[in-house]
Amino acid sequence: MSDAGLYTCKAVNSAGEVTCDIELIVREIERAEELRHSPLLLRHAEETQAPAFTETLQDLSLVEEDDLKLQCRVTGVPRPEVTWYRNGQEIVPSVNVNVSYEDNVCTLEVRNIPVDSAGEYTCVAENPAGEVTALGTVTVTAKMVKPRFTRELGDKICIEDKPVKLDCAVKGTPEPEVIWYLNDQPLEEEDRASVEIKPTRTETLHYLTINPAMPGDTGTVTAVVRNDAGEETCSSKLTVEMKKESPKFIKKIENIDALEHDRVTFVCTISGKPQPEVTWLKGDTVLMETENIHMLTEGDCYTLVLENIILNDMGVYTVRAKNVAGEQSCTARLRVTGVKPPKFLEEPSDCKIPEHGTAKFTCKLLGSPVPDVTWYLNDEEVVASENIHMEYTKKDNTFTLILEDNMPVNTGTVKVVAKNNGGEIEATAQLLVSGRAPTFINKPIKCTVLEGDTAIFRCSIDGEPSPKVEWSKGKWRKLEHGGRFKVFFDDQSEEHVLEIEGIQNKDTGTYTVTLTNEYGTETCPATIFVTDKPEEAEDWREQLTHITIEKAAIEEVQEYDWKDVLKPVETVHYDVLEQEAVIDLRHVEQETKEEEKTVKDVIPTTEIEVEPYDLTERIKRDKDESIQQAPEVTPGVPEALEEERDRYQRETKDIQETEEESFKLEIPKVKWEFTKMIEDVVTTEKGVAKFECEISVKDVSVTWYIDGVEVVPSPKFEIQVDGTRHLLIISGVKPEDSGEVSCIFAEQSTTANLIVEALPVFTKELEDQEVYTGRSFTLVADVSRPSILVSWSLDDIEITETWKYKIVNKGCMRSLSVHDVSLDDEGQYACAADDAQTTCYVTVHEVPLDFTVNLSEMEANEGEDVTMTCELTRENVAVVWMRDGSDLEPSERYQIISEGVTHFLKISGLTVDDEGEYTVHAGEKVSTSMLFVEEVATEFTVGLKHITAKESETVTFECEVSKLVAPVIWLVDGMEIVSNEQYEITVYGLIHRLTIHDVTPDQTATYTARVGENSSSADLLVEEVAAEFTVGLEDITAKESETVTFDCEVSKMNAPLVWLIDGMEIVSNEQYEITVDGLIHCLTIHDVTPDQTATYTAKVGENSSSAKLLVEEIAAGFTVNLKDIKAKESETVTFECEVSKENAPVVWLINNMQIVSNEHFEIFVEGKIHQLIIHDVTPDQTATYTAKVGENSSSAKLTVEEEPLTFCVPLPDELTSREHDTVTYMCETSKENVHVQWLKDGQEIEPSDKYVISDDGKMHVLTMHDVNIDDEADYSVVAGDKMVTSFLIVEGEPIEFTVPLECIDATENDTVTFRCEVDKDNTTVFWLKNDDKIQPSDKFEMRSDDRVHTLTLHEIGIDDAADYTLVAGDNESTAYLAVKGKACQVVAPPSGDITAEERSTEGVSNDRTSSHMNRQEVPLDELCVEQSAVTLHAQFDAPEWEHITAEDVASTVHFGTEDFSYQNSALIRKTKMAKKNSFAETCLISTSLSQHDLGDNTEHSESDSCLSQTTDCLMQHPEQCLIHGSQTIACHIQTMSDVEDKYSIHTPGSDSCDTFCIGCSVKFNTDVVEMDVEILTYDIAINRYKYLFGNKKLAYCL
């Protein structure tokens, strides 16, 4: 491959020269192809042998610089080629790496192995017959060197709160760890301590920084360096000097407003070093600890506590802090307000409530401040909870306690305790909990009854005293006992009952039962639904919760003398009234709705005439038919109605007596008319109008009208009927309800007038009021109707709602509230509505202006602050302050403040001139007091002191003056000092300080403090400190391109230090970096070069420190070579190498041609790392790439494999869509911009409105709109030689079964037809039998006629019993065909019980346990005899297991015949069950014959009887006894030869010879479980003997 490149041919002669270029491209041969051309390759496949390792690689553990040797032995034909890899990268032979392959032994040798050569080594052997790999792991451990300090720690001295940094340098292998200790305690990295590690070429620097340093850090700092080879220790001394700080208030005390008798706490936080001494003062008086004064200290927090304060405790409090560095103080004011003890304006009252009721206790209190209220019940404090609420109304100072859900145990005393700073009071009330509010224990339930039936509502209730029970329909109609309605209390069930007889459609609705006692009312609705369809009626009687109790016998119906009301007439209409006459006789005492219906239906006119009806004939007929009970119920009438009619049926008279009293029945003429007319009603608005009339006939339906409009019952209009009496009640009448009221029935009517007189607009007038300014008042008027709108005015000026005026309209109440009343609010107020209005006059009185608190005389010292206070009866009154008759104006010293009724004058920094008479004027009212100011002379009580300090220290001059506000001026050598960063002037009360930071020798001078004519002076002497080196420079040896740092430490902060190289000063730049960190000065030289080898000097003042730098030159070379790369087309590859020098110029070549960085080739350099990144490689970029630095180069091969075109995301195999949907096919190719072709059933698809084809890079999309059945086809997309196909299924609308299949029971040889119907014509369907598709045949006939589909089965047999399914589209319908055997003649009924017992598969045992199967008698029709053969069938209920629904077949029978054949057969049946695990069981059915059943048979042993005397073996092939089972049960019937030729039936292997076994099996499949039960058919031939086979047992085991 290295021969590839550009070759040039040059021809030269005397006339000139010419050149020609040609490129040589060397194509790399694939390994497989290379092996094919190998001379070792065998030409015949049968001669090859795949490589195999006979000796594999072994894992090795080495130490750094050891030699590595890996060997393995491989065989194969032809001879395999061997390649070595480390961590997946191919190993290239070099100076230290040797690879050999001799005599089938593969060897890899690496000399002086470095640590980074550890990893997984792989040997790959391959030939045309295959490839094999051997793996081995090599572990390389670095050599260990004991750690040591190349630079030890040095002692450090620092000031508190400043950072301190300690450092050391160590080396060792492996890299050692440094652990830091302070005073023998390990230092963990935390907020103050941090550790930094900086590795260099020859050593590692470790730094410990403590920031900030604290005095407690003073001690010994120890560094312990350790690795696996050992450890070493070095220590240094750290001294942290405490700095002095004058006291400083972090948090000052604050002004406090408190109530008399309160507990007051002043809190402040003070810092200072050393901790200051704190003194508390009130005014100028130092406070001492007493019973009511406590002074607390906790750290920097100082507290003054005043207990039970009084008015005299009001004043200014000062806290003073002092230490050797200075003094500070701050003040705060305490204001004490007097209190008023609590007083009851209204005490709580006694309360009586029922169980679970709510009790409410209220009291009103007066007190300042608002008292704290605590409630007690029976001396236990009441705490708010879900059922306990405590409320406070600030408006009227009302406190309320609400107790919910009370029980008798809560009866007792309720106590309220009110307490504030002024005192404590209490009051009590009694709580009595007794009785119970009405509640429902069982509520009436809704019922659905037949028309004409009786509806019953029952409810059980609770309450004490016993509640009153009322029934009503709707909201207004009350139901009373009588007529069809029976309201009573059932003593036996203790229920309240409402019965409604003869239910009609109009009785449908909601009924309400209402319970009432002195503790409240409870209601419950119940609904009646009336139907004329018996199948819709619910059996609601069974839902009644009470126990049905038979009612007492109904008293005998009294005889009624019909002669008094009936008279004979000439005309007879027998055919019309025969039935009605009989019913009337039976219900002569009952006025029911049936009678009303009969009259209405039969006699529509106002008068009726009926011919006589001779009852004699009817009575005779009753006698002949022997009817002693009620007549036969009409079809469709429920039995319940029959029972109700029985209650009213008269006893049948003696026939003879009836005949003697026979007479003709005559029904008289009835006249319908109003016997009482309605009368005019005059009432007032909101009243009730009642119209009443009477009709000669009871319960006649009438219609009410108002002004010709029919009246419909509602809450406003109530219509009542009570026999012949009819009422119309109109509630809440309005004037517009006036009109003509009519009542009409048939052709009769009566009319009257309703007159409604309107109420006045205002039912409550406004009332005059008097009010003071600043207060509020409310005017209230009531109107007659809520809908009336009103307007308000003051002196005929309309009032609108604002913050001052609040207008409220609530129901019929109208109110106007006026807030913050002024004199302008006086006048006549009017409330107007329509043409009416009500007025009142409001008189406003101004509150008299006066002083409630006058000014008081005051005394104060010069320089103090004072506050004068007064209070007025009115708020916001303008006042004027005067001193000695002159007005005072607000200024910096005079503050005039008004807060409501309180007025303040604050004077700051009193002077003697402030003394005098102070007056405050408020209108005509005046308050005066004297202020006396005591003059204080200003002088120095403590003078300045001389100070001697060292350079850079901070010094403070301090003095104390006699006046608090005396102005002190500071001077230095007679010049005034102004406060700045260096000079800090502070004042703490009487203490004045001058602080000078970082003093220098030139600040040595005399400093003076002057106040007035007095002054105090002191000298400052600053001693200069010479800077020197505490840590000097050290020699450094480094290699070219490294970074080195010279560092030193001086004794003086900010000392000017100069760096020199060979006597020349160094200036900080990119290569030379000069840094200062406190006392440490550093010179860092980046990328050192050999010409920088020199002597470097650090000079401070007259002192200097020097060290040498030796730079070793390194030739540039490759430390990491390029590696071959194999990539796929379009990938991005990166060649990377590492050179020994940073920023060494590296040239990249491809086939010896230089590469220039562009979009395709990216050249990247980072330090020593050089990369060539090639984006989107193509196969033609397969070449050799070279990196060249100086004379050295490194090359590697890039092999680009062309990516075959594939479908990354193919089409789905199948896609289903519904008609008219939009279908989208989408696929993705492995390459972009590939042309694809879409096909439908092999034909190219052209883009159109229906077919939309789009491409986006690798994505290709075909969209089909509005698909139909014709679009169902194979759709393909072709890209190059690749093609993918998907079948599109277009489904029509889903098919539904309008008539599903139904199960069929049939008999053998019958012809049956399954029929179903779907909702679509010409639907494609197919039939299944037990999930197997049915094909048309002579037996199965299938027909489809439009929507009807049938399946006919001819001459069915037992094996045709199965599930039959019709599949239409996605839906299916299934039905089961049950096939019975042919019916036979019954010979003898079955006898004896059937017992199902569990049975083990190991053998037959007489000792069995009962299974879960239930016993059933064998139906007679299932036992039959045909041609001397007995077929026995018996059915068992399957065990109630979740996975079994089958019915199993077995039987026992007693029979007796001569010369007959006995056959026992069983139905083979398949049953679908739930999915379960697959398993198989073999079950036994055993039939045991007792000795008694076989006669006096003599027992014989198995050897001498059962087996030796075989005369007739009825079963020649015992293997027939096994069906589907896994074991064979041999069944024999042996004949014993004796006098009577007895028979014995037995099973081989059992102890007795009296058991006959039949094999059966149960098989379960995995998905749909099918149970096959098959019982072997067996024959017993008996020629001459008659036996009774009985007492047989069948065992079914599962």
Image: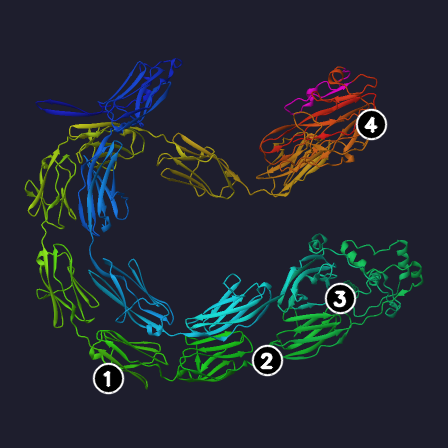
Q: Position of residue 1138 (x, y in %)?
A: 22, 32
Q: Is residue 296 visible?
A: yes
Q: In percent of the image, x 74 and y 30: which residue is there?
A: 1593
Question: Picture quarter containing residue 1590?
Answer: top right
- At label 1, the amino acid type is Asp
Q: Is residue 1065 above or below residue 503?
A: above
- Disc 4 marks which residue? 1456
Residue, disc 3: 483
Pointer 2 residue: 758
- Closer to the camera: disc 1 or disc 4? 1
Front position among marks 2 and 3: 3
Earlier residue among tags 1 and 4: 1
- In front: label 4 or label 2: 4
Which comes sooner in the sequence, label 4 or label 2?
A: 2
Mark with earlier residue (2, 1): 2
What distance separates the C-alpha of mark 1 from that of mark 4? 150 Å
Frontmost of labels 1 and 3 is 1
In the image, residue 629 lies in the stretch drawn in magenta: no
Does residue 358 appear left or right of residue 42 in this picture? right
Dot 2 alpha-carbon crowd within 10 angstroms: few under 14, some 14 to 19, many 20 or more: some
Q: Secondary structure at mark 4?
A: loop
Separation (CA) of disc 3 from disc 4: 72 Å
Residues in magenta, as a range: 1509-1535
- Which residue position holds label 1? 884
**Neighbourhood count class around disc 1 (C-alpha, 10 Å): few under 14, some 14–19, many 20 upward:** few
Give the CA separation, mark 4 to mark 2: 107 Å
Of the 4 image quadrants, the one containing the C terminus is: top right
